[in-house]
Amino acid sequence: MSPAYGSRGPFSRLRGSISFRLALTHGLLAVLTTLILLVFVYVQVIGALNTQYSRQITAAAQRLMVEFEEGGRAGLVKAIELTLSDRIDSEKEVYLLLDGNGHRLAGNMDGLPRVPEMQVDVREDVQGDIFEGLITQDGVPVQARLKMERLPDGGILLVGEDLSEANDIIKLIGHALIAAVVLALLLVLLGTVIFWRELEYRVGAIRRTAAEIRAGQLSQR
């Protein structure tokens, strides 16, 4: 063995090994395939959460509009107060009822939401649409998904869901996906080294046998 070859470190030998590069390439392809699958699942989970929140908000808005049609403003105020006091998901439900002059009549929001990065008039531009905005509850800013309805008497009804819990779930899933990818990369690297060492051992045995045969030890055939 030449001094130049003998001075090569283990990492240089790995980089120069065809078997190592081949095993590593196949391992990384497997990780890439897994990553694409995980991203697809992540996107589907987010889509399912958004769809669920939108359906809940739409159903709540429709129910309160019926209450307004049947009981007028007083009936709507009573329905909102009853909904917030029933202890059923009331910690994440958000409501706001304003009269025609913008005075707060009921609800657990301090005022109209802000829609960041959008130059819109909440009173007009998002009428009937589901949108995301920053609301305040007792002075604390909260991200929420909302739906606004303009009432026949000029009032405004806002119905929504606090997104804090959903954002926590999305972050948790994101962290789990990152951990899974890191673990997969470590396993691929470990598996590649093990495969390379096993292949090098077997190829080395063949080389030694061939060398002995060339040296005249024909019994090794």
Image: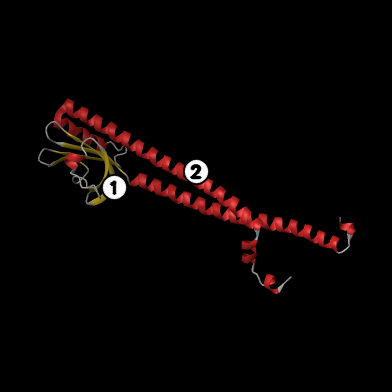
User: Seen from this angle, which residue lies furthest top?
Assistant: 70
Whether residue 64 appears in this view of the structure is yes
Quadrant housing the N terminus = bottom right
Q: Of helix, strand and loop, which one carries label 2?
A: helix
Could you say where residue 176 lies in the image, as x and y percent from the top left? 47, 49
At label 2, the amino acid type is Leu
Q: In the visual, does 108 lie left or right of 198?
A: left
34 with respect to 58 (left or right): right
Q: Position of residue 85 (x, y in %)?
A: 25, 38
Amino acid carrying label 1: it is Gln
Sequence-wise, which precedes: disc 2 or disc 1? Answer: 2
Query: How many marks overall?
Result: 2
Q: Estimate the x, y position of residue 52 in percent, counting from the top left.
A: 35, 36
Q: Residue at x 32, y 33 (%)?
A: 55
Q: How is the image coloured?
A: secondary structure
Residue 49 vertical placement versus 119 (above, below) = above
Label 2: how many Cα within 10 Å (few below 14, some 14–19, many 20+): few
> Neighbour class for label 1 at 10 Å: few (<14), some, many (≥20)?
some
Q: Judge whether residue 106 can be spotted in this image.
A: no
- Residue, far front: 214
- Label 2, on which residue? 37
Q: Quadrant of the C terminus?
A: bottom right
Residue at the extreme left = 101
Asked which quadrant contains residue 198, the reply is bottom right
Which residue is tagged 1?
143
For image coordinates 25% across by 33% down, the residue present is: 61
**Looking at the picture, does residue 70 appear above or below residue 48?**
above
List x then y, in percent, for residue 133. Answer: 26, 46
**Label 1: element kind:** strand
Q: Disc 2, disc 1: CB below 8 Å?
A: no
Res. 98 image quadrant? top left
